[in-house]
Image: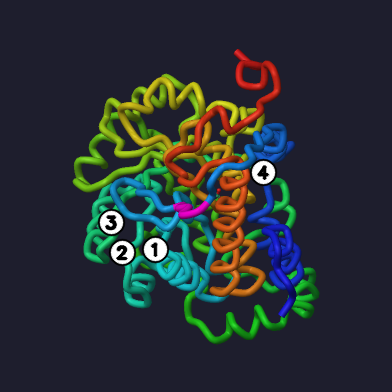
Amino acid sequence: MPVITCIDDLKRLHKRRTPKMFYDYAESGSYSEQTFRENTSDFAQIRLRQKVAVDMSGRSTESTMVGQKVAMPVALAPVGLTGMQRADGEIKAARAAAKFGVPFTLSTMSICSIEDVAEATQAPFWFQIYTLNDDKFNRDVLNRARAAGCSALVITVDLQILGQRHKDLKNGLTAPPKFTLPVLMDLATKWQWGLEMLGTKRRFFGNIVGHVEGVSDPSSLSTWTAEKFDPTLNWDKIKKLMDMWGGKVILKGILDVEDAEMAASVGADAIVVSNHGGRQLDGALSSIRVLPEIVSAVGNKTEVWLDSGIRSGQDVLKALALGAKGTMIGRAFVYGLGAMGEPGVTKALEVIQKELDISMALCGERNVHDLKRENLLIPQGFLNAYS
Ligand code: GLV
């Protein structure tokens, strides 16, 4: 068992053990990948303010997210095709999250279905919805999520159409993979992945295949989004969906103050400041750069969370200190899953919690709720560099 000390260690193993097509899917941004890169490089520009000789006993990373107790304010984000990174990947990640005490979010574009995850886990998970141009499917999928005991609905608002990720086109991304010569050559070095995949029946988009008809290639994410996602999604439809759900709602993919105000006014319990991990609008600002203005506009009306770019507990600390009440991680847990399955997801969570706890202590803080702007050193002009 290799010694894992940071999320980058898991990323290296993920790359080695998972078919290139799926590693690349996770590790892509859209177009030039500028926003994808800046999500992490902007976090790196922010520094931490050291405080010494402060009592650091009795520390806690515990908090709540939409009223739910969490071991740290870090939820697993919805990630499409997670069950292609490892066989039954969504079930493995959901189990690791539940044992650790953080929420898991199941993507509409998952491989394991809502019912699969509910059957294999005890704790309630969250469900993320992409609305399709099929009202019956939208109604049914909410009923399925309710029947499975999902405790919150995450509505992704920044993906009615897919930002192009060059690598997915070049790799011919499908779930399951089509056995072309390059795929077979790649799989020859990823035999453990292949063996595990042979041992599961879950190799298709489990929430949609068999529930919706009339898509020209049911194994292709880009075909689903182009042919079946609802391009007319607007605030009225979001509000209707929220009413149809009737429970806690998190609106994910907000990057603009006016949109944040709209989201708060329709009654979102939380919003996620997110650029979809740099996978949608290339050229958009990093989430951490826009977080503070959104917190000051709507932070007293709804919980403001952040995703996109978090690869460490220090990044979580920075987001919390800039006013986020919670965070979501996508790639950071997917690296763990691709590297080592369920124990890898647990490892990713342990790494992040330990980094958060120790960095918080060295900043002179004992509780995540006390983190504030003064714990950070931010370059002059960083937060209002763009207008
Ligand atoms: C889907 O959510 C994607 O970003 O690929």
What residue did someone put label 2 on?
A: 124
Give the magenta range. Answer: 57-61
Tell me which numbered mark, 2 or 3, is placed earlier along the sequence: 2
Task: Give the residue at x 71% y 32%.
Answer: 45
What residue did someone put label 4 on?
A: 29
For badge 4, the amino acid type reads Gly
Mark 3 vs mark 4, CA separation in Å: 30 Å
What residue did someone put label 3 on?
A: 151
User: In the rendered image, is residue 35 in sight?
Assistant: no
Q: Nearer the viewer, mark 1 or mark 2?
A: 2
Residue 361 image position (x, y, % from top left): 58, 47
Task: Give the residue at x 23% y 37%.
Answer: 240
Prevailing secondary structure of the magenta residues: loop
Residue 318 image position (x, y, % from top left): 58, 38
Q: Is mark 3 within 8 Å of ligand 1?
A: no
Question: Is 68 displayed left or right of 219 in the figure?
Answer: left
User: Could you say which is closer to the camera, residue 138 or residue 26?
Assistant: 26
Mark 2 vs mark 3, CA separation in Å: 6 Å
Residue 292 image position (x, y, % from top left): 51, 25
User: Could you say which is closer to the camera, residue 257 or residue 34?
Assistant: 257
Tell me which numbered mark, 3 or 4, is placed earlier along the sequence: 4
For badge 2, the amino acid type reads Pro
Residue 58 part of the magenta-drawn span: yes
Tell me which numbered mark, 3 or 1, is placed earlier along the sequence: 3
